[in-house]
Image (cartoon, grey):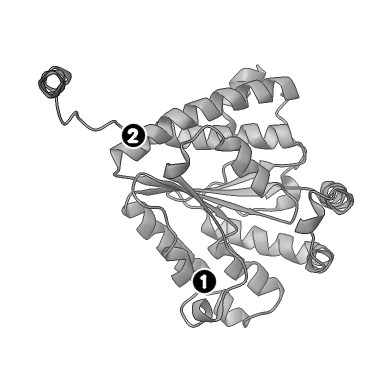
Amino acid sequence: MCYRVAMDVTKQFRVKPGERVRLSDWDPGETLGMDREECERRLAENTEAIGRLQHRLYAEHKRSVLVVLQAMDAAGKDSTVRHVLRDVNPQGVLVTSFKRPTSNELAHDFLWRIHRRTPRRGHIRVFNRSHYEDVLVVRVESLVPKEVWSRRYDAINDFERNLCESGTEIVKIYLNISPERQREKLVRRLTDPDRAWKFEPADFETRKKWAHYMEAYEDAISRCSTDNAPWFIVPTNRKWFRLFTISQILRDTLERMDPQLPPLKIEPEAAMRLLDGID
């Protein structure tokens, strides 16, 4: 029973176009009845499959994949990249982390810096935070007026539709963590010398505005989950379920794309004759 549910995990957490999202309806502790052992086994299978499919995508050199990761602090975006993409060839995968815009970036439209980093044909590109910061942080922190950020949802949908029509599959994942679980992880980060460097005083201010960020995320996900560029709300309180779920979503996406190896440029027999001639 659990195995069949796991195979349908992509549909379980996909936001339907036009659906009004209330994050309080999505349980961050959900596991679909699966246990850690099963999820870790399935994760290993999925990462191996993702590695094979990424090799074919790179060789095909016609399409690409963009994975967007959005979440509150300490939800596990970095560890998701490390674990889910552990079996891919690094030359075909790039990760971009969007920070505060530079003065040069601010001199352009808000999507300028994003479009410059979209994936090349044959590549998987991961956005660790993304263009959605311009309807999340910008909104909550009142960095621009409402009449500015409220128009950006349509601009984002147009931008993503253009990418899809150009051959880029888009997978957008919100790592749904509870405030209680986030607090546990922030405390661990503060007390662990290997992780404390990640902590910034601004993290406290962001946490104070949790309700405002949830409202901003609800609007962004509701207004920008489309057939071509769907949002997935992934339960994140249990790391092992989060990693399995995201790996399943990415594997399903690549299998649906079904990238094909290009035809041989030279028959093996002819190549062998040439090699024999050189030797």
Q: For numbered disc 2, what is the local secondary structure?
A: loop
Residue displayed at 54% across by 29% down:
47
Q: Position of residue 29 (x, y in %)?
A: 77, 38
Crowd band around label 2 with a 10 angstrom C-alpha radius: few (<14), some (14–19), many (20+) = many
> Is residue 35 visible in the rendered structure shown here?
no
Is 78 positioned to the left or the right of 165 in the image?
right
**Which is more toward the observer, 13 or 48?**
48
Crowd band around label 1 with a 10 angstrom C-alpha radius: few (<14), some (14–19), many (20+) = some
Mark carried by residue 22: none
Residue displayed at 72% across by 63% down:
213
Q: Position of residue 99 (x, y in %)?
A: 61, 66
Going by the numbered disc 1, the residue's amino acid type is Arg
Q: Position of residue 148 (x, y in %)?
A: 56, 80
Height in image: 62 above or below 48?
A: below
Is 78 positioned to the left or the right of 90 in the image?
right
The residue pinned by badge 2 equals: 259
Q: For numbered disc 1, what is the local secondary structure?
A: helix
- The picture quadrant where one finds residue 62 is top left
- Quadrant in which the C terminus is drawn: top left
Height in image: 235 above or below 100?
A: above
The residue pinned by badge 1 equals: 152
Height in image: 129 above or below 93?
A: below
Question: Mark 1 to mark 2: distance in Å?
Answer: 33 Å
**Which is more toward the observer, 92 or 133?**
92
- Quadrant in which the N terminus is drawn: top right
Pick out the residue farthest to the front.
279
- The picture quadrant where one finds residue 274 is top left
Is 216 positioned to the left or the right of 16 in the image?
right
Q: Earlier in the sequence, mark 1 or mark 2?
A: 1
Q: Position of residue 257 (x, y in %)?
A: 37, 36
Going by the numbered disc 2, the residue's amino acid type is Pro
